[in-house]
Amino acid sequence: MPARAAAVRLLHDVLTLGRSLDEVFDRHVQGLPSSDRSLAHALAAQALRWRVDLDRLIDGACVRPLAADARARQVLRVALAGRLRLGTPVHATIATSLALLDGGPRRLVHAILARLDREGATLGDVPTLPEPWAGRWAAAFGPDAVTALRAALGEIPPIDLSLARAVETITWASRLDGCSLEPGHVRIGGSHRVEALPGLAEGAFWVQDLAARQVVHRLGDVAGRDVLDLCAAPGGKTLQLAAAGARVTAVDRAPGRMALLRDHLVRTGLNACTVVADILEWRPDQSFDRILLDAPCSATGTFRRHPEVLSRRHPRDLAALAEIQRQLLARACNWLAPGGRLVYAVCSLEPEEGEAVVATARASGVELQGTERLMPGTGPGDGFFVATLRKAIG
Ligand SMILES: C[S@@+](CC[C@H](N)C(=O)[O-])C[C@H]1O[C@@H](n2cnc3c(N)ncnc32)[C@H](O)[C@@H]1O
């Protein structure tokens, strides 16, 4: 019961107030035993992954439409996520749901749950992607990609770890009972509690999606090179660059996120120079022949780990984000040395934040050498757009 009450509060904060699940989780499960914390997370996460399909069942069983933010709808989403995704028995589902409500909503929820049970309601094999993203992605990437994206939304993703010392890859893959897909990387099951893993406190690794690692690889061999890491916090890519032997200058305007980056550096024993500054105002006192710009974006490519991003974001946000990305990219291009390479990345699936942004870079004196789109479901992990740009010599 406390786990379900917490899951309802989490859904309210995420879907009505637009917060992220990670951001509000601790507050709503404070004081609960770890089994209840895990159940609250599982219920909320399943409700977010399957939201479109759960709402369709709820709407089909309602005589009068239920408001999107009604408490009864949140309770029903949690109840059905438990019943249809986690296998909670029907009697427990009804009893625990009714205990969260009073009066009319209580009778309504009872009637809907009983009706759905009588009718043998089920979910499909994969969740439905919410609109307007589903339509946009079908138009941009085609039906096969959408099938893979739906499957990706339905699965709890594995946890990818990057190692501070790549020579320890085999050791840590074995100690953590994981597998490695490239040197310096270990993948473990998504149900692990990272805080409880051996090696974390000693700084042997940090959590970093495998697709995010590919972004850094596009800079080539960085050992012994000066690399400017723009929009660096909380620092997964900074750490990866430092672990690869680069002399990194990491810049980000968010002090709290930069504090996390510094904590990671201390924990792992890696080095980087950190600068808290707004890139639209700051400038470096040297040029760099390797620059990474991991720009702020809609983050639609991260929906496997953060399904709520598809509810929190809307395509109308894209124009403003793209304008900032263009400005950041123009600044970064100024600081690239002749012959130097700049990698621009966003964890977004939206062409407005990818192809359309780098198409403007020629005006800043750089050549586009190539672009790539890493797709959830078929790629190594989260979705990314990555472009490699070069400044001509002379
Ligand atoms: C996608 S995140 C970066 C993730 C990071 N590269 C990593 O691998 O952990 C984007 C970052 O851009 C930063 N940012 C946004 N606008 C900025 C600006 N004008 N100047 C500096 N940093 C900015 C945000 O604070 C945020 O940390």
Image: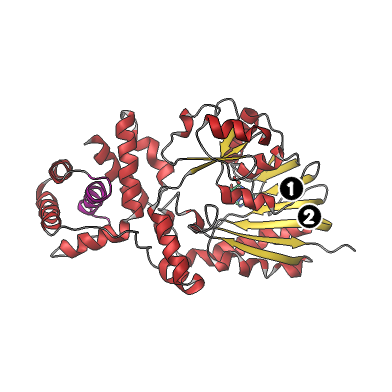
Cβ–Cβ below 8 Å for labels 1 and 2? yes
User: Given the image, on which type of amino acid does mark 1 rest?
Assistant: Leu
Q: Quadrant of the N terminus?
A: top left
Residue 312 seen anywhere in this rendered image of the structure: no
Dot 1 crowding, Cα within 10 Å, few <14, some 14–19, many 20+: many
Residue 228, numbered label:
1
Q: CA distance from mark 1 to mark 2?
A: 9 Å
What is the quadrant of residue 262 in the picture? top right
Give the residue at the far bottom of this rendering.
Answer: 139
User: Given the image, on which type of amino acid does mark 2 rest?
Assistant: Trp
Image-based side of 113 in relation to 393, left or right: left
Residue 78 seen anywhere in this rendered image of the structure: yes
Q: Nearer the viewer, residue 36 or 102?
A: 36
Q: Is mark 2 within 8 Å of ligand 1?
A: no
80 up-or-down from 3: above or below: below
The residue stretch that appears in magenta: 69-87
Residue 335, numbered label:
2
